[in-house]
Amino acid sequence: MVTYPPDEAADGVPVVETVPDTNGGQTILVVGEASDAATVVANRLLFTHGGQGRLQLLVSTRARESGQTRHPAVETIDYRPEPAPAQEPRTETEGTDVVDGRLTSLGTTVSRRILEFRRPLDGQVDLRLCVDSLTDLLASHDRETVFRFVTTMAGQIRRVGGSGQFHLPLPWDADEAIRLAPLFDAVMEVRAVDGRYEYRWLLGGGAAEWRAI
């Protein structure tokens, strides 16, 4: 149960005294305009290490810069909302799948990878899934389609007792954040302050205290 002390944070959001338990079977919407902070959250709080029975998947809508590396224990699915021109061949790197076009194709690709991973483990899998970012999907698809995709992916995560983060680099009170929040078990806000990153939980109209990432 979330309770509120009488004081409010500097930004006017009530400070809550409890934070959600995010150990398994949880989907989290990560908001805040500091997109780099969201990446740090994923690497430190979601993608920790590989291991027997753990599947770590990153669904990325962002083009990777030359020389940029990703977490070595994370499989990457690169999604391009619009197919690349025919004269520009797609480039794939080891451990990366590239999916063009429809969100249904992306959902099928993710679901198939989870099934492939589960089969030799008799259905037991520690799933960690990150979608970065929902703003790119909303810019290329209608809202209803994106909402269905989120609902489907959240169902996959909960079905195997996994954990998922969906990044939305917008202010916590942006219209899309408010509309998407009910689809998730919890909402986390991230920010950059004086060269460091911080996060806090947003619950029941209030917010937990900021913590360093």
Image (cartoon, rainbow, N blue to C red):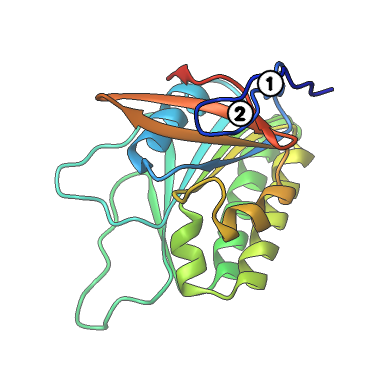
Q: CA distance from mark 2 to mark 1?
A: 6 Å
Residue under the point 28% across and 50% down = 93
Residue under the point 69% across and 40% down = 119
**Residue 110, horizontal then vertical, whole percent:** 58, 53
**Residue 182, horizontal then vertical, whole percent:** 74, 49
**Which numbered tag is attached to residue 201?**
2
Residue under the point 46% across and 32% down = 42
**Which numbered tag is attached to residue 19?**
1
**Vertical side of 119 occupied by 137: above or below:** below
User: If the image is split into quadrants, where does the C terminus sit?
Assistant: top left
**Residue 206, horizontal then vertical, whole percent:** 68, 32
Quarter location, residue 54: top right
- Among all residues in the image, which is located at the extreme front? 6
Quarter location, residue 24: top right
In the displayed structure image, the side of residue 4 where residue 127 appears, left or right: left
**Residue 57, horizontal then vertical, whole percent:** 50, 41
- Residue type at mark 2: give it: Trp
